[in-house]
Amino acid sequence: MRISRSFKYLVGALLVVLAVASGADVPASAQGKAITLSMLAGYKEDVLRASLPDFEKKTGIKVVIDASPFGDLYKKQLLSLSTGAGRYDVVFVDEPWIPPLSEFLLPLNERMKTLDLQDFIPTTVASGAFQGTQYAVPVDPNVQLLVYRKDLFEQKGLKPPATWDELLADAKAFHDPAKQQYGIAVTASSDIQTALYMLLAMWSYGAELVDANGRGALNSAAGRKGGEVFLELLKYTPPNVKSYNFADVNKAIQLGQAAMAIQWASGARPMEDKTRSSVAGKLGYALVPKAVRQTPMRGVWTLAIAKNSTNQDAAWQFATWLSGKDFGHAAVKYPSATSAIHSPRFSVLKDPGTKAALPYADALLDSLQITKERPRLREYADIQENLRVTAGKLTAGELTLEAALKEIDAGTNRILGK
Amino acid sequence: MGTGRAGRWFLLPGLVFLFAIDLVPLAYSGWVSFYNWWLIRPRDVRFIGLANYTRLVDDPEFSRAVVVTTLFTVGAVLLEFLVGLLLALLFAQPFKFLRPIRVLLLLPLFVVPVVGATMWRVIFHPEVGVLNYYLGAIGLGPLPWLSDPRLALVSITLVDAWRTIPFMFLVIYAGLEVLPSELFEAAAVDGASAWQSFRHITVPLLTYIMLLAVLIRGMDAFREFDIIFVLTGGGPGTATQTIQILNYRAFGLGHMGEANAIGIVTLVIVAVMCFVLMRAVLRPQTTRG
């Protein structure tokens, strides 16, 4: 059977139209490209991988994921980007790393104008900027929350604590080691979370890690008060918090051992998984306590493009997709309760479906609107490492609070060349 | 003569290979250690001479790391050597029922260090760990294996011993198996006790092998990283913060000059350690020979 020439032309034209239509929003320079993404392994990676086929099908852009655990992610990104190895086109970056990596990232100010920025929570957009230049798109806003057992608080007729004094009183009230019931779960190890808990308390009392003159400033009355409250809190924790990390705080809640915890929103979803948590559905979420001010710590995960990437358009397509509404809604519906990427968009976090699936959505949104950022300095990774090591020495009993505060400031000043 | 000279050329590929993969990177590392090179400031790379080294000397954290590393190395190697030797002596006995167990004994050697350490982190876990469960059942626990500053160093030493006792056992056992039986038979005829045979025949003949095992393990333990990183990350406080943990931190933060200086200092310490150990053990043997 012979096919007429005009029929062939018709089929050919149809195929061209279909191909163009399927990638209508994708510039020709991005289509058919493969990009390499440096990604946080595990609980952020899973939900991304589940949705990735949709992106690849829609755009024709293949995404190769190189996943690393949290402790290695910054090191790998810094090494790859700074040496011009060209290994990554796009990097999943924790916001404190934006200033040190900014030298190697593509400025996105012009591209950001193509996004509907009104829908983004403003503090999340700020997390991707440094010295007036936008280097990254927010894709997963994270903030510290107070997690509490609604059932236990109701039994005692208590309201969730709004201040550090109330938090201490409630932690004491619920602390009953004989019954393996503890007031609050936080870390007191050499883990970075310990330093951030301590900093949160110090911030609340008005202290700053780095002051307006660019000098270490924790060794102050406010810093001492915050440090004392943090150390006091450790009296009402499970007995082994000196070896705790992020996941152990979750475990203490999931096993029903702790009445409260201060935890990043990223850790909240597994607590609501009925197959893994004995207290799923019994938890309430609130803003972290305040003293002279309320300072929930911001820790937004962002997506940045390597300055030397040869696939910048494709990388931008990926960034817009990951920060988009469709992915935001898909991530909420993702069945695994161990994996969570939250949207930085008002429209997703305020959606009734999101609120039903994520009981902490309101607390996350409220916190993000008043959240406090860590110092935006190129040297911040070093400053935070100094804070981590010294906080670990404090909780291990190697240093007194006063000596620790002096050591933190001395380290900060040394790093900043002051 | 001509044949001998021609033979030297056969050494060339090996020497070139050694030069390329060993000496060149080492020299480069030494060269970088004289620079102030911070990856986040690629346009500010400066030659600073010995400043990275003097900073290490003045840094109390580094001095403490040297002490922690030495304690860990001595403790781990001593424990591994003694247990390895005892096991080797036991398995050298003609008990047939012990033979299948030899294979089981070697299993930890095949476990990837990070995997083994992660497994032990779960075993040591204060709330869900199996070790504290059984210790509690017999009234000896629970113990804060990784959260107590003194116990944490013991814990990482035990895990290192668990992983590398099989190596010590294997090396010493292999040495025992090839000892000439005539000497032991002659000693028995002369009425030597088991202890005398061990002290005057086994130990002298095994000295080189034991030295080799201790040297290899000593160098290895001094550079141990995986187990400590997974189990404690250097904490609590600085209780298990070894030189390698400091080195990892310096590299991770992009301080290439400082990190390479730490690497060179480690190399020097390990080289001195080997030299001293070899001199101490080999000198009497050489004199006798």
Image: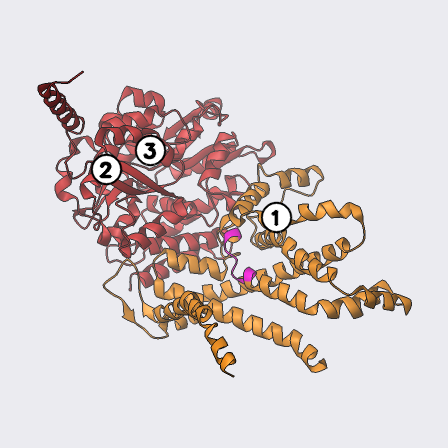
Chain colours: A red, B orange
Query: Within 10 angstroms of label 3, few (less than 14), some, or many (20 or more) residues?
Result: many
Q: Which chain does the numbered disc 2 sit on? A: A
Element class at badge 3: helix
According to the picture, the residue beneath numbered tag 2 turns out to be A319
Between A47 and A94, the residue placed more toward the observer is A47
Identify the main secondary structure in magenta.
Answer: helix
Number of disc labels: 3
Query: Within 10 angstroms of label 1, few (less than 14), some, or many (20 or more) residues?
Result: some
Does any portion of residue A293 appear in the rendered image? yes
Element class at badge 2: helix
Judge whether B82 appears above or below A313 on screen: below
Toward the front, the furthest residue is A1
User: Which disc, if any, is residue B108?
Assistant: 1
Q: Which chain does the numbered disc 3 sit on? A: A
Q: Residue at x 26, y 30 (%)?
A: A55
Between B69 and B192, the residue placed more toward the observer is B192
Residue A10 included in the magenta stretch of the image? no
Amino acid type at image mark 3: Leu
- Which mark is in front, 2 or 1? 1
Q: Which residues are magenta?
A: B220-227
The Cα atoms of the two marked residues, 2 and 3, are separated by 12 Å
Q: Are marks 2 and 1 in contact (CB under 8 Å)?
A: no
- Which mark is in front, 3 or 1? 1
Q: Residue at x 43, y 22 (%)?
A: A281
